[in-house]
Image (cartoon, helix red, strand yellow):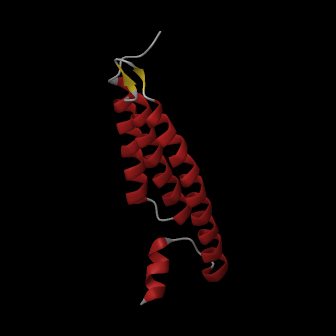
Amino acid sequence: MTLPLYYYPTVAGLIFAIGIYCLATKKSIVKQIIAIELMVNAAHLNFIAFALTPEGIDPYSHSFVILSLAVGAAIISVAILLAVQIYRTYGALDVTLLRRLRK
């Protein structure tokens, strides 16, 4: 049993909206990193959902998503490393507090 195609963009849009909401409302750097990862995964879901063509499944979109997952994992690991260094230096992960330190 397969789901209709319009379910996947609906779920991806919901996941993307949750990511945007978390990015806009959460003040912790770690929570913002997780929100960005949610948004990227929603885009991956759309790529995989629309990979189905009348001729079959398009392997290029699958390879693009796998490559994007690998690059995204490296980027997220660097972002978490930067968050740890910020916490060690300033003792806080709150974005509003860190903005005040800049002035």
What's the residue at 39%, 32% (across, down)?
Answer: 11
Tally of numbered discs: 0
For image coordinates 62% across by 60% down, the residue present is 77
Residue 60 lies in what quarter of the image? top left
Quarter of the image where one finds residue 16: top left
Q: Which residue is drawn at 67% across and 78% down?
A: 88
Pick out the residue farthest to the bottom. 103
Task: Give the residue at the far right of this rendering.
Answer: 88
Quadrant of the drawing holding the C terminus = bottom left
Percent position of residue 56, x then y: 42, 19
- Residue 65 horizontal/vertical position (percent): 49, 41
User: Residue 23: x and y, percent?
Assistant: 42, 57
The image position of residue 44, as x and y in percent, is 45, 40
Q: Is residue 92 left or right of residue 97?
A: right
35 relative to 55, above or below: below
Position above or below: 18 against 92:
above
Q: In which quarter of the image is residue 8?
A: top left
In this rendering, the answer to whether 83 lies above or below 2 is below
Residue 80's place in the image compared with 100, above or below, is: above
Residue drawn at x 51%, y 71% is 94
